[in-house]
Image (cartoon, rainbow, N blue to C red):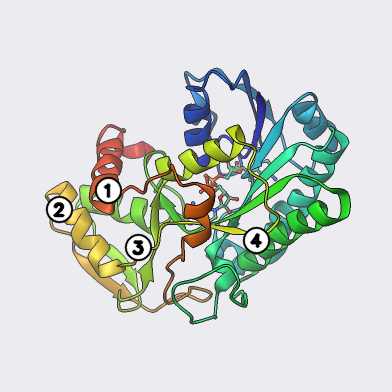
Amino acid sequence: MKIVITGGAGFIGSNLAGMLAEHPEVTQIRVIDNLSTGFKENLAGLDVHFLEGDIQDTALLDQACHGADAVVHLAALPSVPRSVKDPLASHHANATGTLQVLEAARRAGDLHVIAASSSSVYGANPHIPKHENLTVAPMSPYAVTKLATEAYLGAYHHSYGLPVLPFRFFNVYGPGQRADHPYAAVIPKWISATLAGQPVTIHGDGTQTRDFTYVGTVCHVLTDALLRRVVDPRPVNLAFGSRTSLLDLIREIETATGLRACREHVPGRVGDVPHSQADSTRLRALFPEVATTALQEGIPTTVDWFRQRPTSDV
Ligand code: NAD
């Protein structure tokens, strides 16, 4: 199998490349990435065909997709605050970019397309847990771009018979997720701050909850979906129904680091949803073999990754 990963130099994409490289069925991994938020070094030591460039570049996309079997489409500008600051950039990369990938998949002979949508599409809908048939209510431009991503996959399935599988990722964390940029996610930011003896900044009172999902588990599901060619035009939640408050998360980080975190509360952020927890019924039915990774296991592994990196680098 020849697999294309868009955004493969990013956090989830590089973890996926590492996992796919272990599978004998996978004969070639091709990554297309413009390195806007990813790093070539994330792929160091992996046997990957790297195409540096943008998914808006149709010629490059065609080169990546030629003779391939499947595309895992992860390339995107992945941040709610970033999209609030510059909605057009997020739309361009995430929504138009998805359309470009789908067109390339079609031109290359109906490749299997798996793509990353996001739990943010549930937005203002307060129902917990989030099951896939709930009314979506995006609260940020980012969430709209992800809704467009999954909707385009569905539309390409119905209009052209393209074999697709859109996933709604929840809060993915783990080794490879960096803290050294303004739009860093909460887990890398807080681990990095705690290790450096700096305060952890909590937006709001910290009672917000999230369904944190370990990156290894996400990559297992993606790998299984590729190898078994799982097709479904309806979005599937990729999380296992855990519900951790941000205050509890800090306690997990303190346990794993053996350090005390200094809490600093600041006002809540525009576009942030209060609670997020997946209903994983459809995921478990489609991927019965995949087991979840508890936070008590995933956080220490992530802390280890941070400890092994030069402090200027994370
Ligand atoms: P990431 O920023 O580490 O990876 C995204 C990659 O896409 C980067 O390597 C970046 O350089 C590349 N990229 C961005 N725009 C591009 C373009 N126009 N052309 C080519 N490459 C481009 O982010 P991640 O956390 O690995 O996220 C991967 C996907 O999962 C994204 O689509 C994101 O929206 C989605 N997602 C992530 C989470 C999470 O918790 N990490 C949650 C929900 C959804």
Crowding around mark 3 (Cα neighbors within 10 Å: few <14, some 14 to 19, many 20+) is some
Q: How far apart are marks 1 and 3 (CA)?
A: 14 Å
Tags 2 and 1 touching, CB below 8 Å? yes
Crowding around mark 2 (Cα neighbors within 10 Å: few <14, some 14 to 19, many 20+) is some
* Callout 3 amino acid: Ser
Q: Can residue 177 be seen in this view?
A: no
Q: Which of marks 4 and 1 is nearer the N terminus?
A: 4
Is label 2 in a helix, a strand or a loop? helix
Q: Which of marks 2 and 1 is nearer the N terminus?
A: 2
Q: How far apart are marks 4 and 3 (CA)?
A: 22 Å
Does residue 113 appear left or right of residue 116 in this picture? right
The residue to which callout 2 is attached is: 255
* Mark 1 lies within 8 Å of ligand 1 (Cβ measured): no
Q: Earlier in the sequence, mark 4 or mark 3?
A: 4
The residue to which callout 3 is attached is: 242
Q: How many marks?
A: 4
